[in-house]
Every structure is written in C-alpha cells, then in structure tokens.
Image: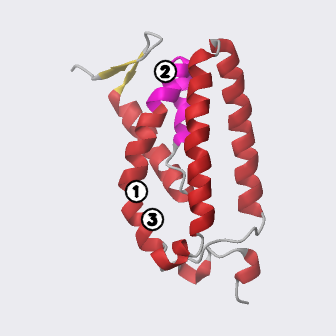
Amino acid sequence: MVRAAIPTAAGRARSAPLGFAAGGAVGVLGGMIGLGGAEFRLPLLIGLFGFAALSAVILNKAMSLVVVLTALPARLAAVSFTDLGAHGAVALNLLAGSLLGAWAGASWAVRMRSATLYRVLAVLMAAMAAALVLTHTTALGSLSCRCRCPSGWWRPPSRRSS
C-alpha cells in the first residue's frame, strides 16, 4: 500500500492523513475563537512539518484567507449586521490599520534574517497566547450574539443571569 505524502521545505515528508488531522484540529480551535486558525497552524508548519519560517508565514497567510472566507457565512449568521454596524467606525479603522500593518510586516519579514524571524515569531506567538488568556478570562465587553447557545455560556460573566 502506498501512502500519500506531503513534501516540506526541509525535505521531510509527512503523511497526508497527519496533515488532514492537524488541519482538522486547527480548524476546530480556530473556529471556536474566531481567528481562522493561523495562530495554531504556524507552529505546526514550522515544528511538525519542517517549513522554514518565511515559507510557513506565507503559506499560513494564504491558508488563512481561504479559511476566513469559508467561515464568514457562519460568523455572519451568529452576529447580525445591526450589531456589527454599531461598531463600524472601530471595525473600519482597525481594518485600515491592519492592512497597512500587514503590508509593513510582510515587507519586513522578507528582509529579515531567518534566525531573527524565528525569534520574532516566537515572541509574537507567546504574546498572542497571553492576550487570548487575558481576553478569555476577564470580561472586557463583547458584541451581542444571536446564536442559540445553551444557558448563555457565551456571555461575559457580568451579563450572566443567576
């Protein structure tokens, strides 16, 4: 029996089922927190599949675009346009800043030495983990959710009914 393999930048090959399983886990985790999975996928691309940092970043960004566009209809069904519109100014400014920042970050990443890029990625991943812990353990406010969640578990602690 011949197993399909996924070649990597480091010359290592991993099985296609491993890639599928890892992608499934990344999809579930990313879908739960609404970030598309890039924060989980990048360490796997580098550590498990052996991609060089810059190659992993580029591939991760391309995959994120596909994942986010695919998940968008489900997200829009959970939060109404009216709720989003109330935060339109924040969203548009955040988007504009993100677009400029992404352009600058990509420009810097392609000019960095590989060792420096690895260090920068490690610091950013640790900072994202800390931010996720902080924002998911404290009530910082949220958009209202129109999904049918059991017993309101999605609400911040200050909004739960007793």
Q: Position of residue 147 (x, y in %)?
A: 48, 77
Q: Is residue 48 above or below residue 71?
A: above
Precedes in sequence: disc 3 or disc 2: 2
For disc 1, the marked residue is: 71
Residue of label 3 = 75
Q: Residue at x 38, y 52 (%)?
A: 69
Q: Is residue 57 visible?
A: yes
The Cα–Cα distance between marks 1 and 3, rounded to whole angstroms, is 6 Å
Secondary structure, magenta segment, majority class: helix
Residue tagged by mark 2? 55
User: Residue at image x 35%, y 33%?
Assistant: 17
Q: Residue at x 55, y 43 (%)?
A: 99
The percent position of residue 109, horizontal first and vertical second, equals: 60, 23
- Residue 61: give x, y in percent of width and height: 47, 35
Distance between mark 3 and mark 2 Cα atoms: 29 Å
Rendered-image quadrant of the N terminus: top left
Residue contact between numbered discs 1 and 3, judged by CB atoms under 8 Å: yes
Magenta region = 38-59
Give amino acid for label 1: Ala
